[in-house]
Image: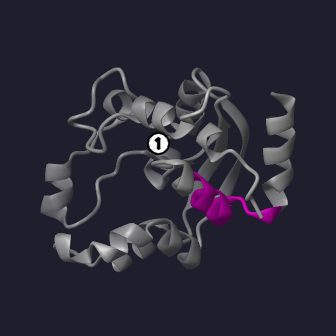
Amino acid sequence: MTARVDWTRWTVVLCKPDATQRGLVPQILEWVAGTVTIATSRQVVVTREQILAHYADMLELQHRFSFDVEAELVGHYVGATVTVALAYGPGGDTARQVRDLLGHYDPSRAARTTIRGYYGHDSEEAARTEGRFVHNLVHSSDHPADAEADFRIWFGEPYLHVLSQEATAR
């Protein structure tokens, strides 16, 4: 489906339920758009299948958590509205560029000049005490292979035209 796509130029940005609830999605996407192009975005009501596929790596690390990872993911995400955006950077290494904008996964440790550092109100310590994941507003793909996997989960075949139009327009 996406074999000819140069995934070094693409990443997926997921504005999580805490960003949606706080009304921060426009500000987060505007911040990202200052560095890369937002090719498209959409609101999604999260399904169980989507969130378990998206965080499959966390499910494999269940032994590192003091809470039920699957139950936490399902409870926090399923039925919630999130916004996903497909971002394009013509220079490549787009996933890293966007992750640099996000900052440390723990907002209390993120630089104030990053999205999580500026808007974040949670901490890993609070999350651990409450037996949950850190609410850190936004996720983006870690690397090109993750960008492709995230695209399949959140966009899929109906959005293939965005990849080809944007890539040929550059």
How are the residues colored?
one colour
Query: How would you classify the magenta stretch by its main secondary structure?
Result: helix
Left or right: 40 in relation to 143? right
Quadrant housing the N terminus: bottom right
Residue in view at x 73 percent, y 59 percent: 3
Residue in view at x 59 percent, y 62 percent: 149
Magenta-colored stretch includes residue 56: no
Q: Which residue is mark 1?
A: 22
Q: Nearer the viewer, residue 1 or 128?
A: 1
Write the start and end of the magenta stretch as one range. 147-157
* Residue 48 versus residue 147 in the image, above or below: below
Is residue 65 visible in this depiction of the protein? no
Q: Secondary structure at mark 1?
A: loop
Residue type for callout 1: Arg
Residue in view at x 47 percent, y 45 percent: 19
Within 10 Å of disc 1 (Cα), the crowding (few <14, some 14-19, many 20+) is few
